[in-house]
Amino acid sequence: MINNNIQLDEQGRLKHFLSIEGLKRQQLVSILDAAETFANVQEQAVKKVPLLRGKTIVNLFFEASTRTRTTFELAAKRLSADVLNININTSATSKGESLLDMLHNLESMHCDMFIVRHNQSGAAHFIARHVSPHISVINAGDGCHSHPSQAMLDMFTIRRHKKEFANLKVVIVGDILHSRVARSQMHALTTLGVSEIRVVGPKTLIPAGINTFGVHVYHNMQEAIIDADVIIMLRLQKERMQGALLPSEDEYYHNYGLTEKKLSYARPDAIVMHPGPINRGVEIASSIADGPQSVILEQVTNGIAIRMAVMSQTLSPRTETTKTGSTV
Amino acid sequence: MPESQLFNLVRQSETYNISIINGRIIDPANNIDKVMDLHIQEGKILTLGEAPEDFSAQKTIDAAGRVVCPGLVDMRVRLREPGHETKGTIASETRAAAAGGVTALCCPPDTDPIIDNAAMVKLIRLKAATEGVTKVYTLSALTQQLQGEKLSEMRELKDAGCVGTTNALHPVKSTLVMRRALEYAASHDITVFIHAFDPWLSNGCAHEGVVSTRLGLAGIPDSAETIAIARDLQLIELIGARAHFCQLSSAGSIQLIRQAQESGLPVSADVTAHHLHLTEMDIGFFDSNCHVIPPLRTQRDLDALRQGVSSGILSCIVSDHQPHDSDAKLAPFAETEPGISSIETLLPLALKLTDSHNMTLSEIISRLTIQPAQILNIPEGTLGIGKDADVCIFNPESYWRVEKDKFLSKGKNTPFHGWELKGQVEFTIKAGELVYSRQ
């Protein structure tokens, strides 16, 4: 009974945006299409549209972030919403006020949307399940679980370069175990019909049962990269270097860093992606990050359009439409 | 005040002569499964069948269509008192136990303060006698403060009434400490109850597998359990200690215990009722009511556990009752406290194996009564003449819907809310006293 998809309202429309899992292909395509129109808005002199005028959006970040928070803020402002940024030190909340108490306080200030980032998997689902019905929740990253807006901006970037998803070979490289980005990407790529997804990394960074995502696992990067159309590099968190996951940055770069030589195994028109921030000389050579095949900065730009699309779809005036629907 | 006087203050309970008529008496300890009457006098079982001529009952219970069995013996119940009275008290949780048909239970030492001295044992026994409605037994801490380093005074604790010893869910520092603890316990004929887990592999909150990977939750592989069992079995073989493995969760563990039993090691094992019915899939999208330790594992493990119960490798089914206040479960999954308020669903969940695994009622009841009583070495779980009249009367055919808000337990944390279960407790009698009646 708990398995019903709380992301969707009774009409099956997007109410919260928590994970790619559970969304249909058509819903993903419609977000990509909407983002396409918003991408055009960004290129005009006046970058604002009045879609969410009068709405209040709260950026609720329990974990540090620059890029994601800023692009969400910009996206909200370009939709003419009012934005509130709240950065919460998680240790402070665990001491005193509970997460739910804080949410209820914010709710009573008549907000319309929470954009949540939290270091615990499932935090966004938890919040969505406990907020008042009029509030939408967007997951801006929860623990190792999901980062759906990042995955969608990656899909958007891929579509702009490759047009069709069906015949692509996509390689995801690095710390799959701790990556919410990789999990969301795998769901999005399979839902959109990508024929071959490969994940690469040492066994210490590949989680158990990953094959149930419909991906092929490689431990050798050269082999994995052969004929790839899209190469997605994941960020290697510095703190993962401690402990027994990896022996050293050098050894990691040698085996799994994207170098000119390794890239030469991919298709010549392959694109290189990275969710940022990049560790030059750990995951990727500078010459590639700044080179012609890199679309890393484009991803950041596209992030704004995708987030505008997601916000406008979840906050669309659903009560009015149901009313007119019933009178017709 | 001397102890004897203290116990004199204990309220003398209302016991009167009771006749339970027309019920199907199932007493695995005495190999009985027959429709007949049961007569209780002065808190003891007087006779089965015809009442003696001079016997007169003040109360008669017509148990036609009902099963009359020994009160259940639950080997693992957190009462939460002392230390966590917002989650549960001896008064509330023993009443919940009675509603589940349980008349004797055993609580682990991980209370606050910890049961590692005789005074604590006395305190709990006194509170149970004055405020509780079931018999309460305790296990002692295996190591001081459960820190896994120094042995507790387990002999003194045994003399104070502890029926075994355990380090509960706390790790033992090293294999050497484990060896010494098993040796010392064996010298004093104390059974060690082992929660087998490798602490270095157990730093997670869900079974390491498909679901933990999908949800991005830190996983606990089944090898965290099997490695520890394999190690401890080697020590037990070396020392000849008597040990009981608590709440197994994986197919591999069953295999290890089976081999050990076949080679003649004095080991037994149990399983919780929820591990017989739930898998990792039940976590769905982060249902914190399914956060338990050891974690819910795969369908294959569940099948092996059920098979283990029916073949007898797992000789007891326990509730591992862990009531929580609602806040404990209101957080992102990994931050919630593990455990299920499970004592009121123990019997019907166990009874489900009669349908799925062709087990007889008597076989199930033995795993809930005489077998745990024998492992704990306590005089419970039987309807033998002259024994305490601890009786559970249930309707094996009636269906009921689990409603957490109707639980007597303070803990409403159950993943079984809304389940339709078969088998409902109607009366529970402890030493001749009616401690639960459904009406």
Image: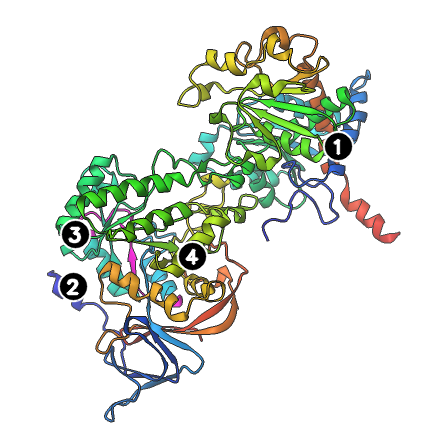
Above or below A77: residue B357: below
Q: Residues within 10 Å of mark 4 (few under 14, many from 20)?
A: some
Which of marks 3 and 2 precedes in the sequence? 2
Colouring mode (rainbow / by chain / secondary structure / one colour): rainbow
Residue at numbered disc 3:
B157
Would you say residue A104 is visible in this rendering? no
What residue type is disc 3 on?
Leu
Total residue callouts: 4
Q: Which residues are magenta?
A: B99-120
Q: Residue furthest front?
A: B263
Residue at numbered disc 2:
B6
What residue type is disc 1 on?
Ile
Residue at numbered disc 1:
A31
Q: CA distance from mark 4 to mark 3?
A: 36 Å
What residue type is disc 2 on?
Leu
Residue at numbered disc 4:
B307
Above or below B329: residue A51: above
Q: Position of residue A137 (x, y in %)?
A: 64, 37
- SS under mark 4: helix
Q: CA distance from mark 1 to mark 2?
A: 73 Å
What residue type is disc 4 on?
Gln
Mark in front: 1 vs 2 = 1
Q: Position of residue B299 (x, y in %)?
A: 50, 50
Cβ atoms under marks 3 and 1 closer than 8 Å: no
Query: On what subunit does the disc labeled 2 rest?
Result: B
